[in-house]
Image (cartoon, helix red, strand yellow):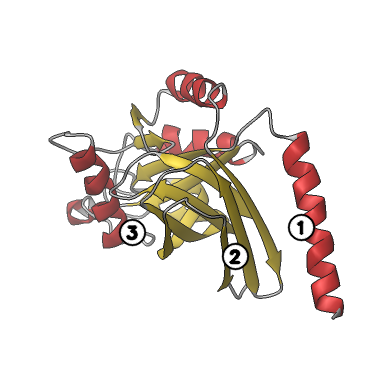
């Protein structure tokens, strides 16, 4: 019973916070990067600045297709490479590259062009957001509520990430450099689907200390309709 009362209080507090921040929607920024890419460090540094913002969910996804040139990225995951290719196919693009930033599941931007990224974030925040997303973490569980005018099919995704990691790179294009990475994604899972016809309520396990992000997105690497993060 105490747990239920505490959870209810959390939901009420979150609802109040959501109303107060309603004028500034949270925008998802995905950086596709690699420790083996000599052009990526400026974008990696810029992601640290984005990660400080409360109105942005900034995530770093390390791809594996640069591993062959002498340094295996310790954070690279084939799933992230496939996600980047999925965006390319959805946008009818012939190739992928690093550093690349995807803004709210739609715009593709060179990751070391910070002004372009900043301008796109502002542009998305001026648009009406179709879905209100509320996320609460209680112990080892994450409670998710979504409601609004989103039309399905949509996927609900749970992301686990490390806020800051520093790596000494010994080989490859960045040999001899010590690079710090922000919000490094370690796990990205689809945890459900939603058609938007009725409010969404989910409860999922998220044990451990890693922060969590929740992303609601049109199926098939479409637009992001809502994003949020919790510590």
Q: Is residue 215 visible?
A: yes
Q: Which residue is mark 2?
A: 210
Looking at the image, is mark 2 or mark 3 nearer the viewer? Answer: 2
**Residue 99 percent location from the top left of the image:** 33, 37
Quadrant assignment, res 11: bottom right
**Residue 180 percent location from the top left of the image:** 51, 47
Q: Which residue is mark 1?
A: 11
Q: Are marks 2 and 1 in contact (CB under 8 Å)?
A: no
Identify which residue is drawn at 22% across, 47% down.
85
**Residue 60 percent location from the top left of the image:** 44, 48
In the image, is residue 22 above or below residue 74? above
Q: CA distance from mark 2 to mark 1?
A: 21 Å
In the image, is residue 61 above or below residue 96? below
Q: Are marks 2 and 3 in contact (CB under 8 Å)?
A: no
Give the mark nearest the N terminus, 2 or 3. Answer: 3
In the image, is residue 133 above or below residue 54? below
Disc 1 element:
helix
Name the quadrant of the N terminus.
Answer: bottom right
Q: Which residue is mark 3?
A: 76
Q: CA distance from mark 2 to mark 3?
A: 18 Å
Badge 2: how crowded within 10 Å, few (<14), some, or many (20+)?
Answer: some
């Amino acid at each position: 019973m105490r747990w239920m009362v505490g959870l209810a209080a959390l939901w009420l507090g979150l609802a109040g916070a959501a109303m107060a921040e309603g004028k500034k929607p949270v925008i998802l920024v995905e950086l596709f990067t690699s420790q083996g890419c000599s052009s990526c460090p400026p974008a990696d540094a810029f992601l640290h600045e984005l990660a400080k913002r409360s109105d942005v969910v900034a995530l770093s996804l390390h791809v594996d297709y640069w591993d062959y040139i002498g340094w295996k990225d310790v954070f690279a995951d084939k799933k992230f490479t496939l996600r980047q290719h999925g965006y390319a196919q959805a946008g009818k693009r012939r190739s992928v590259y690093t550093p690349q930033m995807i803004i709210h599941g739609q715009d593709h931007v060179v990751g070391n062009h910070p002004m372009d990224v900043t301008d796109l974030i502002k542009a998305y925040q001026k648009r009406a957001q179709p879905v209100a997303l509320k996320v609460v973490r209680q112990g080892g569980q994450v409670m998710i509520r979504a409601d609004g005018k989103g039309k399905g099919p949509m996927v609900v995704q749970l992301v686990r990430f490390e806020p800051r990691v520093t790596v000494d790179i010994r080989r490859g294009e960045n040999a001899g450099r010590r690079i710090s990475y922000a919000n490094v994604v370690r796990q990205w899972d689809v945890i459900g689907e939603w058609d938007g016809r009725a409010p969404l309520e989910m409860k999922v396990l998220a044990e451990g200390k890693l922060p969590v992000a929740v992303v609601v997105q049109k199926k098939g690497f479409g637009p992001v309709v809502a994003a949020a993060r919790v510590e």
